């Protein structure tokens, strides 16, 4: 899915997503990524949302975003309860949605200057 372009104060922007690949700032990634408006990391141990553990998000939680978007791949899959509970316990919003929807939401919130983070899985297989 191609994602529309908007001017934004954020450094990182998702350009497109298709199962198996995500394009950020015109660079294609075939691994899952952790994204904030100012940073991008491919150092995520989990390959799919079902493998994600709360400790995988510790550095992101320390950044204290307003919202963490969990892009679960081409289909919506809910993460383990302890992940959602751990995020909410720190008074951070959390939404588990498809990677396409998470990418669009990330771009919108980042363009508004919001403190948003996303964990974007490229596949749910």
Image: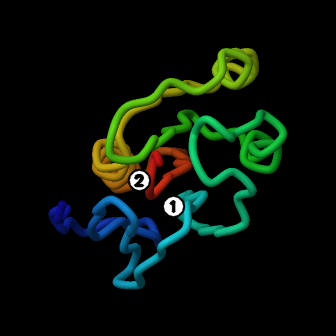
Residue located 55% across and 59% down the image:
35
Neighbor class of circle 2 (other Cα within 10 Å; few <14, some 14-19, many 20+) is: many
Q: In the picture, which quadrant includes the N terminus?
A: bottom left
Task: Tell me whether circle 2 and circle 1 mark residues in contact (CB < 8 Å).
Answer: yes
Residue lying at the far front in this picture: please name it: 125
Q: Nearer the viewer, residue 98 or 20?
A: 20
Determine which of the numbered discs, if any, sits on residue 110 in the image.
Answer: 2
Quadrant of res 111:
bottom left
Q: Which residue is mark 1?
A: 37
The alpha-carbon separation of the residues under discs 2 and 1 comes to: 6 Å
Q: Nearer the viewer, residue 68 or 48?
A: 48
Task: List x then y, in percent, for residue 83.
Answer: 70, 25
Q: Is residue 67 above or below residue 119?
A: above
Which of the two labelled residues, at mark 2 and mark 1, occupies the earlier sequence position? 1
Drawn side of residue 55 relative to residue 125, left or right:
right
| In front of the other: 93 or 79 | 79
């Amino acid at each position: 899915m191609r994602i529309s372009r908007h001017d934004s104060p954020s450094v990182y922007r998702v350009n497109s997503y298709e199962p198996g690949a995500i394009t950020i700032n015109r660079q294609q990634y075939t691994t899952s990524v952790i994204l904030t408006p100012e940073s991008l990391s491919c150092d995520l141990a989990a390959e799919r949302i079902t493998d994600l553990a709360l400790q995988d998000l510790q550095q992101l939680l320390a950044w204290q975003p307003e919202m963490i978007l969990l892009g679960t791949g081409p289909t919506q899959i809910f993460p383990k309860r302890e992940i959602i509970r751990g995020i909410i316990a720190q008074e951070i919003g959390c939404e588990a949605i498809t990677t396409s929807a998470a990418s669009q939401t990330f771009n919108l919130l980042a363009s508004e200057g919001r403190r948003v983070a996303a964990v974007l899985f490229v596949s749910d297989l």
